[in-house]
Image: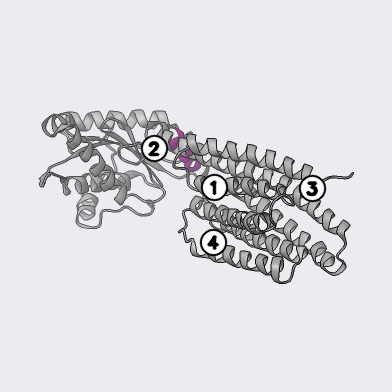
Amino acid sequence: MNLHIETLAIAAFVVSLALTFAMTAMRIFLKGQPGLRRWTQALWLVAAATVLFGLRGKVPDVVPVLVGNAFLALAAALTWMGMREFCGLSQDLRPVFGVTAACLAVQAIFLWGHPSFEARSINVILTSTIWNLASAWTLYRHGPPDLTSSTRLVSFLFFTDAAIGMGLIVPNLIGARQSDPGLIQATQVTQYLAGLAIGTFEVLGLAVMLNQRLLAELRRVARVDGLTGILNRRGLDAEAPRLLQICQRQRLPCTLLMADLDHFKRFNDTHGHAGGDGALRHFAALVGSQLRASDLFGRYGGEEFCILMPGTQGDLARLAAERLRIHVGANPVPLNGALLPLTVSLGLAVYDGNGSADFAALLDQADQGLYRAKALGRNRVEVRVPPPSFRPDLLQEGAAGGLQVRGREG
């Protein structure tokens, strides 16, 4: 099949323009997404370079050879910058401009000093290959852990692009020795076709990567309380049964605490909603600092919070709750230069590791314990039925020691 460079240039321009408009639209509608601005800039540069290459023979060579290839080199560098931004890494334009300037200098040498199409092709391909390898490695090494599937896919595409680039250098080296016009044209055709194919897949891969990040953010927003930064009720309803299933499989006990800030309506009425919000954030920070990485903590609604502590039962469970209660009472809420007292009531329920672990049933038991704590005067820990093994001496020892509960009851 005989393919003309002009035809391929037009096809490449149409495809690159379509991808550029698509990425530009994404940037308009998805403002603030890391990496998107750099990738859009890179695509516009590629579209401009494609136009300039199509003008070859109609304008002086300095335009397509120097300016067009400079656009391509800069586009590859900006793509790498976008990868770093997407991964939350620092931005440094010095290597971008340094490598682009070096590429231009080499192009000028082999355009005027020692004219060689093959040498110029090798220079541009090698420059793009370096940036493609850098982009692939950045995603592979620093891609967000929750986006592994898409980042590894895009990383593979850029590694493939780099491999194709290295493969194209070989015929250029052969062509430099043979000066075969047919080989030169075949190399140009191969470059266009390879660039069209892999470039399209790369842009689609970037779109997939952005889409996965957006979905991850939506899932996080749906499960995280916007005020306190901990799980909301939806998140608790999703995560708590999973944690209880793990406890059930491993025959581990698990304690569920329901916490309610005492007289919160009065606090809200006295200090306003801003003061109430501050109290909720303060409480969440206090409790969160005392929990283990394995514990689950979330806001169940209003001023009610839920804490799930695997590996804890009996006196140790009661001790953990008492320590949290004491810690909250000992750290008043700072508001407008004043320290406002804050106390909490807690209801306790325990799954002993035997039988079926039912989150709804545990929640109901803990809720009844919470109502009991409120009925008995608040600022206390209660269960629906007080455990016969409860030992007050453990609470005295716990209050005198550190506030964190580590490990499980032996």
The three-letter code of the residue at mark 2 reads Val
Which residue does the image show at 65% across and 46% down from the upper left?
A: 202
Which residue corresponds to mark 2?
Answer: 224
Considering only order in the chain, which callout, 1 or 3, is on the residue closer to the N terminus? 3
Considering only order in the chain, which callout, 2 or 1, is on the residue closer to the N terminus? 1
Residue 245 in the magenta stretch? The answer is yes
Which residue corresponds to mark 1?
Answer: 41
SS category of the residue bearing label 3: helix
- Dot 2 alpha-carbon crowd within 10 angstroms: few under 14, some 14 to 19, many 20 or more: many
The x and y percentages for residue 320 are 29, 47
Q: CA distance from mark 2 to mark 3?
A: 54 Å
Q: CA distance from mark 4 to mark 3?
A: 29 Å
- Are the residues flagged by discs 4 and 1 in contact, CB closer than 8 Å? no
The answer to whether residue 233 is visible is: yes
The x and y percentages for residue 198 are 71, 48
Which residue corresponds to mark 4?
Answer: 96
SS category of the residue bearing label 2: loop
The three-letter code of the residue at mark 4 reads Val
Q: Which residues are magenta?
A: 238-248
